[in-house]
Image (tube, helix red, strand yellow):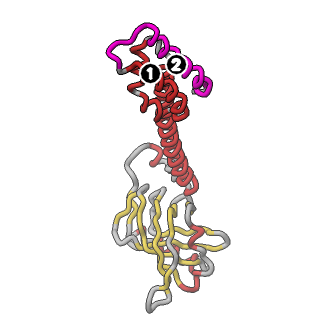
Amino acid sequence: MIKYIVLFILLVPCLAFGASALNLDFGKNEIKQGSLETAKILLKADAVQRVPLQKLKGQTLADTLYFYDVSPLMRKEGSDYFEAEAKVIFAKAPETNALGTKFGEEDLLITWGNSQVLPTEAAQGFIFGKFEIPSRPKILLWLSVTLGVGILAFLIIWGRKKYLIKTTLKKKKRALKQELLSATTYQEVVDLWKKKHKFFDEFPQVEEPFKSFEAVLFKYQFKPRQNEAEISQVIEAYRDFVRKVEGGLNGI
């Protein structure tokens, strides 16, 4: 009973001085302090111009009621009221169901019917009214930072993967180059010739010089046996091939 007497005392001076009345309809009897609640806003047509609802976003009125979000106003069919949806948080648990405050140059009376705000039974900070709500810009900042860190992590992982692939391919190319230019015996030269297409795929520029060496190799390769002179000719043809191509492979 005392609560409603106090509410009446608050209402009378606000109405007398022409305060704009804004009603929040939560659709339930109990609201918890500190929780994000959804409410329907009811605002009379004559107050719409005086109370810019969109500017309520991110504002805490009288250190008590924080407006996280407010939807655009729509006229309620068949009445002189406008409706919107708001997401709000009670930073404190008011003793009455009304809150008189200033919003810009406008006196504003906010009511929430029979809904009761229940105090949060938690840390000492809530009890002494030190509950703080992060402002909307800070929430957006943290979301941006989180997104930025995620993108940065993706780029680092992607870049590292690309670097490892590039490094692996480079090592493979160097190993093939070393193999192509390092034969010392007749058998190693023949083994190298057997894998010529693998070398051509990686170093297409060596294909033409290789044909000259290959022509000498073919003279003796398919004989049952090769004498020392024939082996020497093949080795010399291979060395001539190396001299022709190694300059073009130095950057690998």
Image location of residue 17, percent across then percent down: 62, 79
**Residue at horizontal 43 percent and vertical 29 percent from the top:** 196
Give left or right: position of 103 versus 79.
right
Question: Residue 5, can we see it?
Answer: no
Image location of residue 190, percent across then percent down: 40, 19
Using the image, determine if residue 246 lies above or below residue 92: above
Image location of residue 245, percent across then percent down: 58, 25
Give left or right: position of 86 versus 135.
left
- Secondary structure of the magenta portion, mostly? helix
Q: Quadrant of residue 51?
A: bottom right
Task: Give the amino acid type for the residue marked by disc 2 in the picture.
Answer: Ala
| Dot 1 alpha-carbon crowd within 10 angstroms: few under 14, some 14 to 19, many 20 or more | many
Q: What stretch is highlighted in magenta?
A: 223-250
Image location of residue 34, percent across then percent down: 43, 55
**Residue at horizontal 51 percent and vertical 64 percent from the top:** 67
Question: Residue 56, can we see it?
Answer: yes
Q: Distance between the residues labelled 1 and 2?
A: 8 Å
Using the image, determine if residue 119 lies above or below residue 249: below
**Residue at horizontal 49 percent and vertical 50 percent from the top:** 131
Using the image, determine if residue 89 lies above or below residue 226: below
| Disc 1 target residue | 217
Q: Nearer the viewer, residue 175 or 17?
A: 175
| Disc 2 target residue | 237
Q: Are marks 1 and 2 in contact (CB under 8 Å)?
A: yes
Quarter occupied by the C terminus: top right
